[in-house]
Amino acid sequence: MSSLDLRAEILRLKKEKNAIILAHSYQTGDIQDLADYVGDSLGLAYKAQETDCDVIAFCGVHFMAETAKSLNPNKTVILPDKDAGCSLEASCDAKDLEAFLKANADKNYYVVAYVNCSIGVKALADVIVTSGNAVNIVNQAPADRPILFVPDQNLGSWVAEQLGREMELWNGSCHVHMEFTRDQILDLKAQHPNALIVAHPECTQAVRLLADHICSTEKMIPFCRESEASSFIIVTESGILHRLQKLIPDKEFIASPTHNCSCSNCPYMKMNTLEKLYKALDSLEPQITLPEDLRQRAEAPLLKMLEQSKN
Ligand code: 13P
Ligand code: SF4
């Protein structure tokens, strides 16, 4: 099928199945252009909570589709490629976290889980955060309990720096953001001396120290739009460049290379394709299914996050 036919078929099936297409900003441009909503993890969670469609076609990675299902147990949630995982999610196994919490029960940790984690880890958390609201949510944590932040040590250390609050950090990280190096970003800055460096908080502290601004993917858009600068070195997954360039066409966005590649792709995010989206809408497979007790235990800290995010 040509890409034009594929687009037309996806739109037809979307109508026929009463579906909404949600896409993360790291998806390929063709998927972003077709989606009803493109956003970061936080925006996608709100959209999933608000929709009255019967089917949520989630173009992102598995934990994001699980979040949508946790908030919408009666809706059909499909993910075009069921193997679209996340290295950060894989760096914290629910059984390991459970054992750690048991062994340290005397500490009475307040567990803050970055949304990039499995449903099992979410079920053990007191509250969930995204990169867009982590500082705000951790700021609302009880002052009299020590915080355990899982699974991303980089986001966790950035939040701790922002708030001046010590936290115990799980030893997890995103293999995509770990690839950025100071030397490569400094080289790029030498080639584009007037460009501002905008980095995602999943980057290492060494890289974050070079940044003019650190924020979630969604917040990069208003920052770049409102900034007086006209060019930006974007230190995160390359998919966001499509969105930035589309929404702010008069400015220049420069992708950060890694030591493997001239830009940076998350292999999991890029598993979804228009073809797989079409097949998923046609067959309503692969579907996300969750054991109800686990879903309920994960839903509580998710709802707490959505509530506290408004403060
Ligand atoms: P956002 O929280 O900015 O959506 O990022 C999610 C993610 O997977 C970053 O690698
Ligand atoms: Fe996970 Fe990293 Fe991919 Fe984000 S970029 S989905 S954290 S592997």
Image (tube, rainbow, N blue to C red):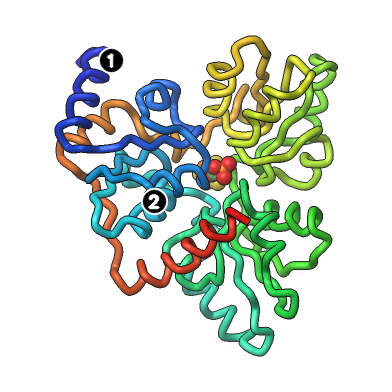
Can you tell me which quadrant of the image ligand 1 is in? top right
**How many dots with numbers?**
2
Q: Secondary structure at mark 2?
A: helix
| Residue 121 visible from this viewpoint | no
Q: Kindly identify which numbered label has been placed on residue 293.
A: none
Does label 2 point to a residue whose CB lies under 8 Å from ligand 1? no
- Categorize mark 2 by other alpha carbons within 10 Å: few (<14), some (14-19), many (20+): some
Does label 1 point to a residue whose CB lies under 8 Å from ligand 2? no
Q: Which residue appears at 22% of the width and 31% of the height?
A: 14
Residue 258 picture location, percent across and down = 66, 30
Position of 213 with respect to 275 (left or right) is right
Q: Which residue appears at 17% of the width and 37% of the height?
A: 17
Residue 179 picture location, percent across and down = 66, 38
Amino acid type for the residue under numbered disc 2: Gln
Disc on the earlier residue, 1 or 2: 1
Q: Which residue is mark 1?
A: 3
Amino acid type for the residue under numbered disc 1: Ser
Q: Is residue 20 above or below residue 110?
A: above
Marks 1 and 2: CB-CB under 8 Å? no
Residue 177's quadrant in the figure?
A: top right
Residue 266 picture location, percent across and down = 51, 36
For this orientation, the residue located farthest to the front is 311
For this orientation, the residue located farthest to the bottom is 106
Mark nearer the viewer, 1 or 2: 2
Residue 59 picture location, percent across and down = 37, 37
Q: Secondary structure at mark 1?
A: helix
- Categorize mark 1 by other alpha carbons within 10 Å: few (<14), some (14-19), many (20+): few
Residue 238's quadrant in the figure?
A: top right
Q: Kindly identify which numbered label has been placed on residue 49.
A: 2
